[in-house]
């Protein structure tokens, strides 16, 4: 396919020149940045305006606008939705309302600093007196969830200070799919380029205050066993992961516990597992001996250990955007300066990386680049060989390390392009490769690993000892047996087959619901454009019993967007897409 280069404000990215015919099911929507009702800080009348057409039913148009609109409770409900306030409950109406608002704050539907719906709007939406709403809000103030500002209203208590950042947009891409006619809309939301210019200090991005929203949902007791699958889930449904080989391996290793359980073991990790991982990496064209591998308590721990080894507070780190919200928050919590790098259809925007690397002040140049090359979260796209080569060249030229997170390797072809494979051709020098098993095997088995250049292995092992002393030899020996007997390979082949079928069903249902995809559907996640502000949509859907992953969660600085991430394995039911259509029509 021929390609063309679209240049916007100094950024050049290649996109396919052949565009599919418009899908009539997809509704064209303006970019949210030009819709004042979606912009952070925009003030609207509490009971109606020319924009809203007067007071509407429901609790809220948005946590930011404070206007009356649909969004908290709708009079018409379907079976399975959360009921309205109960007048015969064991708690008062004010306590029930306070609890409902608190749930939204916990889930970050109402972000820190956001204005709660006006008293009048809440009163009309719930059919209760203004005094009841005031009592609920005052209860939240007393509990520390909310602050009252005279003449302004009630606001969610802010958790962290924000710093400004400069964003600009470039045109997204379109492509075609071999199995279905899918509209990949040209959306500026997919890419957000970094601050322009060189020689100027690059502003730090804010500490995300929403990073734990999805994690709380994942860790909620019984969340994966719930009757209703959650579109925001970051893992496969529990029934998919059920097997007999894990219990068998546990029994086998348990019979040998007396030989290893009474000592800490090797700080680098169980040698048997590291040897099994070395063989597994060779299948990815990453030759890496066992002595260059360090095991960790999961992939997230591996990312953290590498960051703590290489960085000091104030260092600049490049991170793909959109990207995993926990990574933004984790680095910011360590005191790093997070530099967002737009993720495009073929990989990161290398020109943006180049600008970061050539700022006048050497102290402001990045020390690390964190990326997901294969089946990127949330877009699902994988890096191209050309882009991977460019990133590696840049790392060598500007002396920064690449921290490559291959969490989703289990669902990808072995021959997928990895930056580590290019670097390993001459021995790992600039790439630290990270892997884990939570997505494909058992989320609660916290076993991960990293493969590093020779000069970093001992430093990384030292950092690991400072954070966890060691890792579980029992779990590592069990995993080594599972890998060695071929159970993991067969299990992942079955998972890929099931996921392919689930993705096909979910994509068809999404298109029927009037949605489109901002990136070609691949892997576990879909980057879906629903045509309305997904922050507002997430509030509506929470009442219907669905926890969404709005697109704003995946940017370094939370902002309005019509995109959201879905888990293909958890969105195969038409019921979900019907509920989404209904909620969207009322926004």
Image (tube, rainbow, N blue to C red):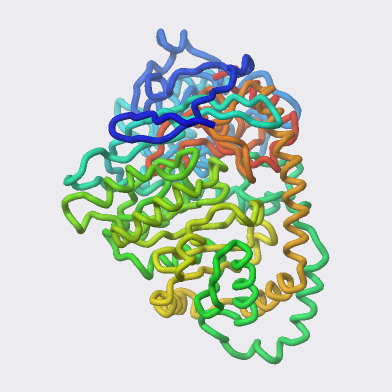
Q: Is residue 252 left or right of residue 50?
A: right
Left or right, 260 with respect to 457, comes to: right
Residue 283: x %, y % from top left: 63, 64
Does 241 sit left or right of 40 as displayed?
Answer: right
- The quadrant the C terminus occupies is top right
Say which residue appears at 34% left-offset and 28% top-offset.
41
Q: Nearer the viewer, residue 472 or 393?
A: 393
Q: Is residue 63 visible?
A: no
| Looking at the image, residue 200 lies above or below residue 577 | below
- Vertical relation: 268 (above or below) 426: below
Residue 295 place in picture, x, y as percent: 55, 73
Closer-to-camera residue (429/501): 429
Q: Is residue 289 left or right of residue 484?
A: left
Look at 43% across and 34% down and name the residue there: 14
Where is the N terminus found, in terms of image quarters?
top right
Q: Quadrant of residue 310?
A: bottom left
Position above or below: 128 against 106: above
Residue 89: x percent and y percent?
67, 35
- Res. 577 visible in picture: yes
The residue sitting at 64% across, 42% down in the picture is 567
Tell me which corner region of the image, top left, top right, bottom left or bottom right, holds residue 287.
bottom right
Count of numbered circles on the image:
0
Residue 268 x %, y %: 52, 80
Depth check, front residue: 239 or 52: 239
């Amino acid at each position: 396919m021929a390609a063309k280069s679209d240049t916007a404000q100094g950024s050049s990215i290649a996109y396919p020149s052949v565009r599919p015919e418009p899908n009539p099911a997809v509704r064209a929507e303006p970019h949210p940045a030009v819709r004042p009702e979606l912009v952070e800080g925009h003030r609207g009348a509490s009971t109606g305006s020319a924009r809203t057409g007067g007071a509407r039913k429901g609790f809220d148009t948005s946590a930011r606008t404070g206007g009356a609109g649909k969004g908290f409770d709708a009079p018409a409900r379907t079976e399975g939705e959360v009921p309205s306030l109960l007048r015969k409950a064991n708690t008062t109406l004010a306590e029930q309302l306070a609890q409902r608002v608190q749930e939204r704050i916990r889930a970050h539907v109402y972000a820190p600093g956001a204005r709660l719906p006006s008293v009048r709007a809440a009163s009309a939406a719930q059919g209760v007196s203004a005094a009841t709403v005031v009592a609920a809000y005052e209860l939240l103030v007393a509990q520390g969830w909310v602050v009252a500002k005279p003449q302004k209203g009630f606001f969610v208590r802010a958790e962290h200070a924000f710093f400004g950042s400069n964003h600009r947009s470039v045109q997204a891409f379109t492509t075609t799919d071999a199995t279905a006619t899918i509209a990949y809309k040209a959306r500026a939301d997919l890419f957000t380029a970094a601050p322009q210019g060189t020689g100027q200090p690059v502003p730090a991005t804010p500490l995300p205050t929403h990073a734990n929203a999805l994690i709380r949902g994942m860790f909620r007791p019984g969340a994966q066993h719930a009757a209703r699958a959650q579109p925001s889930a970051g893992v496969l449904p529990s029934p998919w992961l059920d097997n007999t080989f894990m219990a068998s391996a546990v029994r086998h290793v348990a019979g040998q516990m007396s030989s290893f359980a009474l000592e800490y073991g090797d700080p680098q990790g169980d040698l048997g597992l590291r040897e099994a991982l070395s063989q597994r990496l060779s299948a990815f064209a990453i030759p890496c001996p066992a002595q260059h591998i360090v095991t960790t308590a999961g992939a997230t721990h591996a990312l953290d250990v590498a960051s703590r080894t290489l960085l000091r507070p104030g260092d600049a780190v490049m991170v793909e955007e959109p990207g995993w919200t926990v990574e933004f928050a984790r680095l910011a919590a360590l005191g790093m300066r997070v530099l967002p790098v737009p993720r495009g259809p073929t990989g990161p925007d290398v020109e943006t990386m180049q600008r970061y690397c050539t700022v006048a002040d050497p102290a402001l140049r990045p020390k690390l680049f964190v990326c997901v090359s294969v089946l990127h979260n949330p877009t699902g796209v994988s890096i191209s060989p050309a882009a991977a080569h460019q990133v590696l060249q840049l790392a060598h030229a500007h002396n920064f390390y690449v921290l490559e997170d291959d969490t989703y390797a289990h669902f990808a072809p072995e021959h997928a392009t990895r930056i580590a494979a290019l670097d390993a051709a001459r021995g790992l020098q600039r790439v630290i490769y990270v892997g884990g098993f939570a997505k494909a095997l058992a989320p609660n088995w916290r076993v991960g690993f990293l493969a590093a250049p020779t000069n970093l292995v001992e430093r990384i092992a030292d950092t690991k000892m400072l954070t966890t002393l060691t890792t579980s030899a029992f779990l590592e020996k069990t995993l080594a047996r599972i890998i060695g007997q071929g159970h993991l390979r067969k299990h992942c082949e079955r998972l890929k087959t099931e996921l392919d079928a689930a993705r096909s069903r979910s994509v068809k249902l999404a298109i029927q619901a009037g949605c489109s995809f901002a990136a070609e559907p691949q892997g576990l996640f879909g980057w879906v454009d629903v045509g309305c502000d997904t922050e507002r949509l997430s509030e509506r859907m929470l009442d219907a019993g669905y926890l969404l992953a709005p697109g704003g969660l995946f940017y370094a600085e939370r902002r309005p967007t019509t995109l959201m991430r879905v888990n293909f394995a958890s969105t195969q039911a038409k019921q979900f897409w019907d509920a989404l259509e209904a909620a969207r029509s009322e926004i």
